[in-house]
Image (tube, helix red, strand yellow):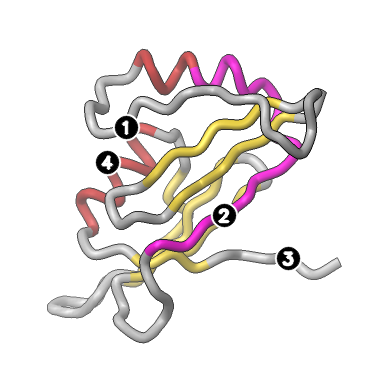
Amino acid sequence: MPTVKPILRIFDHAKAIEFYIDWLGFTLDWEHRPADAPAYLQISRGDITLHLSEHHGDCSPGARVFIDDFLYLEAFHTQLLDRPYKFNRPGLDIPFYDPTALEMTVIDPFSNRLTFVERG
């Protein structure tokens, strides 16, 4: 099967690292960041891989990534609330499309949304 790696637009490298690495717990796999040029990064957390780009033409801000079958969402939610990140305090919801599921959406500093879903 092919692997899908969404590209999300970012505007500030330091804010992206604070949100994705320091708060959400992704790992920085690699980055291409030449002097005086926009950054392009790959980050991952388990089976989730995202590309983050400061390049103007790569994508538009405000995208949404739906991350299905995420395990231990309640524990992850608790970890996030325990970390010192004042810009995002997500809640947990039961989505309309599956009353046995649990859903959490976080919004990055660039208006991109990550929706994590655990199926019951």
* Horizontal arrangement in the rendering, residue 52 relative to residue 5 (left or right): left
Find the magenta span and give its range: 62-77
Q: In the displayed orientation, state which residue is furthest to the bottom.
A: 57
Q: Are marks 2 and 3 in contact (CB under 8 Å)?
A: no
Distance between the alpha carbons at the discs numbered 4 and 3: 26 Å
Residue 84 is inside the magenta segment: no
Q: Residue at x 22, y 27 (%)?
A: 86
Residue in front for this viewpoint, 62 or 20: 62
- Residue 41: x and y, percent? 40, 63
- Residue 96: x and y, percent? 71, 35
Secondary structure of residue under mark 4:
helix
Residue assigned mark 2: 65
As displayed, is residue 17 above or below residue 13? above
State which quarter of the image contains the C terminus. top right
As displayed, is residue 5 above or below residue 43? below
Q: Are marks 3 and 1 in contact (CB under 8 Å)?
A: no
Q: Residue at x 62, y 48 (%)?
A: 48
Counting residues from the start of the chain, the first of labels 4 and 3 encountered is 3
Residue assigned mark 4: 18
Secondary structure of residue under mark 2:
strand
As displayed, is residue 59 above or below residue 69? below
* Horizontal arrangement in the rendering, residue 90 relative to residue 36 (left or right): right
- Residue 117: x and y, percent? 67, 35
Distance between the alpha carbons at the discs numbered 2 and 4: 19 Å
Q: In the rendering, which numbered label is found on residue 88?
A: 1
Distance between the alpha carbons at the discs numbered 2 and 3: 14 Å
State which quarter of the image contains the N terminus. bottom right
Kind of residue at disc 3: Thr
Residue 31 appears in the rendering = no
Q: Are marks 4 and 1 in contact (CB under 8 Å)?
A: no
